[in-house]
Image (cartoon, helix red, strand yellow):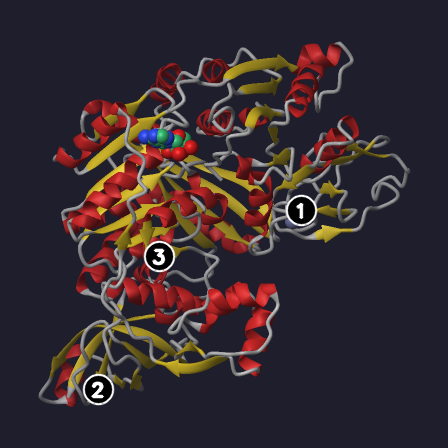
């Protein structure tokens, strides 16, 4: 007889506790099993298993009755002990349950959950000869098919044509357990020769004994090229390389550049299906593929011999997960690099304050690229919106911006317009009684969207019909205030009726592939003006873009958040960086209400250090990061009694801790849940985590409490 200790999956009981069960056979650690738990069946992960002589005696020793494991799910352990240790470490530093960390690390098919998903057999195709008459498009498709390709891959080329081919017997489909061959990586010799500055950065990184190095290079300085060369170096040594990118769909060019140089790259991101993710995961595990480009979660892939991890645009907030476990990819990357003896390269034109401070202190290596490849930084100009409005100009597209757009269009170049607010009008107010229309589930004003002629809550996504009269006073006096991308698009089209204008924001790119479609049409110059939210500020490298216009550029500064200035600075710098990247000088017009604010001055001078010094001075005075670590606890529940219990409990325990402690702040309601934030701050992180863990562990065992989420080192406060 054997006794196993297991972690149980149970969402209502998210404690970090091991439970004991018995079984007749030995079960290897890290296999999943099915067990009875809390009146139902659930899955669990076996952590250890030892033989016992007698069940009764063991039960007496433990002081409780043991239940038998129902069945063993896996033939092989689903994780390695490195991954197990990683999940334990992640659980500790994020103050979140072990099982949620483990599940975050794994593709869905391997997760422990109530409904177990298992991997399917994979469909492959075989291509037969044919003398049938094919259309040109069919011939193209046929030419791109290869024996042994997966059916899923083939269908991506054209679902309808593949179906026809299968019906006609031209393509045969057969099923097989996925089989993995040796790496068939080939490295092409189409690398650009590095400039002397790039070469120096490259050589330094290869020689450095620093675990982490920051590559701080202005936009267009050729950072991407440097790390493609570095990737080649490590691949040639037989090592694995991971390139992390903020969002795959927003960086099609980056993907293209990697694909051009290396064959057999894995792109690991959220648009893959569960099965596809599982297959890619296995290919990495079996050592079949040595280079991965992926978003945040690819940092958890089961590498064998990792040599280099690159974090592109390391300042990007998408590297932090905003639900439990709230981990930052940089911390995980460093942890994994340590385990493999690998190096981490952080790259950005606007590094996070934390990374740059560590680099200045010498904890990280620091490499700088201060020149653009074309040696021309764009020319930036700020338009004062107060003056424009006083001069009775439009405050959406000012006369100055309009003039520049005309110039660019005349020269047959392209324009990017950034406005970080989607929809038509963000506020609908009654002109008679002053009521603002709000979402009934969230404390959030409703946005008017002209494309659907509906009101939309940007918090929960719920849509509402547009009322004719004010729901409060009954007057027909509803007025729309402010503007979003839809209205700016409309105004642009009025000003430039001939121009081909396209909008890109979350509302019109929800479909898979929609981003790519718009961006590739922009690349082929089938679009003259691209207007969009922050999605268009990242990573785009189009030679014909010679003007970037930024509307309402300082709107983000109105947020009462400790990090608002940095986030606004990043957005403006990154967006400006899209202008004039090739042979023509770029121009940037920034429309703002506070042209004298240090964020705008720093952007105007394209001077990161100027911004850094002012911002750090402010952070030091207020004791905000990177001078102290913050730990945010969000308490939320629809039940106000539970909220009260929780706040009382947490306040009492937390106030006993020797850390700076901000009392609960009420946050806006979301989807009917009331929310409160408790904040702690301390210079030293580790003891704070340990102390908070003890409190949270006890908290999770209490009844009648609200849900909580812990966010260590939040990038912005909720
Ligand atoms: P960053 O990543 O710093 O924004 P990129 O790597 O995108 O910069 O480089 C900017 C542009 O310069 C790209 O179009 C790229 O192809 C080109 N480029 C980069 N390095 C070189 C080089 N060594 N020789 C020629 N062109 C280069
Ligand atoms: Zn809502």
The image shows residue 328 at horizontal and vertical percentages of 34, 44
Quadrant containing ligand 1 reads top left
Image x and y of residue 664, in percent: 47, 39
Residue 440 is marked as: none
Q: Mark 3 and mark 1 in contact (Cβ < 8 Å)? A: no
Name the element at disc 2.
strand
- Badge 2: how crowded within 10 Å, few (<14), some, or many (20+)? some
Quarter holding the N terminus is bottom left
Q: Which residue lies furthest to the left in this view?
A: 53
Q: Where is residue 399 in the image (x, y as percent from the top left)?
A: 71, 15
Residue ID at (59%, 33%): 420
Check disc 1 and report the residue beneath it: 457
Tell which circle, 3 or 2, labels the residue nearer the N-terminal end.
2
Question: Which residue corresponds to the image point at 73% horizontal and 14% vertical from the top-left?
Answer: 389
**In the image, is residue 470 above or below residue 529?**
below
Q: Any mark on residue 23, and which?
A: 2
- Horizontally, residue 594 falls left or right of residue 29, namely right
Of residues 631 and 568, the one nearer the viewer is 568
Numbered disc 1: secondary structure: loop
Tell me: residue 644, above or below residue 548. below
Residue 223 position within the rendered picture, expressed as x and y whole percent measured from the top left:
33, 32
**Label 3 belongs to which residue?**
266
Mark-to-mark CA distance, 1 and 2: 52 Å
Q: In this view, does 428 lie to the left or right of 163?
A: right
User: Is the distance from the Cβ of mark 1 to the nearest ligand 2 atom less than 8 Å?
Assistant: yes
Q: In this view, does 326 lie to the left or right of 138?
A: left
- What residue do we see at 52% from left, 20% from top? 586
Mark 3 and mark 2 in contact? Answer it, CB < 8 Å. no
Mark 1–mark 2 contact, CB under 8 Å? no
Q: What element carries label 3?
A: strand
Which-is-in-front pick, marks 3 and 2? 3
- Gap between marks 3 and 2, in whole Å? 40 Å
């Amino acid at each position: 007889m054997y006794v196993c200790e297991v972690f149980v999956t149970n969402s209502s009981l998210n404690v970090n506790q091991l439970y004991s069960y018995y079984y007749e056979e030995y079960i290897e650690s890290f296999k999943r099993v099915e067990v009875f738990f809390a009146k139902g069946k659930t899955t669990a992960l076996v952590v250890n298993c030892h033989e016992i002589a007698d069940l009764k005696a063991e039960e007496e020793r433990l002081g409780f009755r043991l239940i038998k494991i129902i069945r063993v799910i896996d033939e092989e352990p689903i994780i390695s002990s490195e991954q197990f240790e990683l999940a334990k470490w992640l659980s500790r530093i994020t103050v979140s349950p072990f099982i949620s960390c483990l599940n975050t690390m794994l593709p869905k098919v391997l997760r422990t959950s109530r409904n177990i998903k298992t991997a399917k057999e994979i469909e492959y195709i075989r291509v037969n000869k044919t003398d049938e008459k094919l259309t040109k498009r069919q011939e193209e498709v046929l030419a791109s098919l290869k024996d042994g390709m997966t059916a899923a891959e083939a269908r991506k080329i054209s679902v309808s044509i593949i179906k026809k081919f299968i019906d006609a017997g031209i393509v045969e489909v057969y099923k097989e357990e996925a089989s993995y061959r040796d790496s068939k990586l080939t490295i092409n010799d189409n690398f650009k020769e590095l400039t002397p500055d790039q070469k120096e950065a490259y050589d330094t990184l290869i020689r450095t004994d620093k675990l982490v190095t920051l590559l701080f290079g202005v936009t267009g300085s050729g950072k991407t090229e440097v790390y493609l060369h570095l990737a080649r170096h490590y691949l040639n040594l037989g090592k694995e390389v991971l390139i992390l990118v903020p969002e795959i769909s927003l960086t099609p060019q980056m993907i293209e550049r990697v694909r051009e140089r290396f064959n057999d790259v894995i792109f690991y991101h959220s648009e893959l299906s569960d099965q596809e993710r599982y297959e890619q995961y296995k290919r990495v595990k079996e050592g079949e593929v040595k280079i991965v480009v992926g978003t945040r979660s690819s940092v958890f892939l089961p590498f064998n011999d990792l040599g280099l991890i690159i974090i592109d645009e390391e300042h990007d907030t998408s590297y932090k997960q905003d639900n439990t476990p709230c981990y930052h990819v940089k911390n995980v990357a460093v942890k994994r690099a340590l385990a493999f003896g690998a190096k981490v390269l952080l790259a950005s034109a606007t590094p996070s304050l934390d990374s740059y401070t560590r680099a200045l202190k010498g904890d990280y290596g620091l490499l700088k690229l201060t020149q653009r490849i074309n040696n021309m930084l764009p020319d930036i100009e700020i338009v004062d919106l107060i003056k424009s409005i006083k001069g009775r100009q439009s405050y959406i597209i000012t006369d100055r911006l309009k003039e520049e757009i005309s110039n660019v269009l005349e020269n047959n170049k392209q324009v990017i317009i950034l406005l970080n607010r989607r929809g038509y009008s963000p506020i609908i107010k009654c002109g008679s009684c002053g009521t603002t229309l709000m979402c009934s589930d969230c404390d959030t004003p409703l946005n008017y969207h002209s494309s659907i002629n509906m009101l939309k809550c940007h918090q929960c996504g719920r849509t509402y019909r547009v009322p004719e009269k004010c729901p409060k006073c009954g007057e027909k006096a509803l007025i729309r205030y402010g503007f979003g991308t839809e209205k700016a698009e409309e105004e642009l089209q009025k000003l430039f009726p001939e121009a081909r204008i396209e909008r890109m924001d979350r509302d019109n790119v929800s479909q898979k592939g929609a981003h790519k479609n718009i961006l590739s049409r922009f690349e082929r110059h089938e679009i003259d003006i691209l207007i969009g939210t922050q999605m268009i500020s990242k990573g785009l490298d189009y030679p014909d873009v010679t003007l970037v216009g930024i509307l309402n550029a300082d709107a983000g500064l109105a947020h009462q958040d400790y990090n608002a200035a940095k986030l606004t600075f990043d957005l403006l710098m990154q967006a400006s960086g899209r202008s004039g990247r090739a042979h023509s000088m770029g121009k940037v017009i920034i429309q703002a209400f506070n042209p004298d604010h240090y964020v705008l001055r720093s952007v105007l001078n394209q001077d990161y250090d100027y911004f850094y010094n002012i911002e750090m001075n402010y952070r030091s005075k207020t004791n905000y990061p990177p001078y102290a670590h913050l730990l945010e606890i969000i308490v939320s529940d629809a039940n106000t009694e539970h909220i009260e219990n929780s706040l009382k409990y947490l306040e009492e325990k937390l106030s006993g801790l020797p850390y700076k402690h901000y009392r609960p702040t009420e946050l806006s309601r979301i989807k009917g849940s009331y929310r409160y934030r408790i904040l702690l701050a301390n210079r030293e992180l580790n003891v704070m985590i340990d102390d908070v863990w003890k409190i949270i562990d006890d908290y999770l065992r209490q009844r009648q409490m609200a849900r909580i989420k812990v966010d260590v080192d939040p990038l912005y406060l909720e």
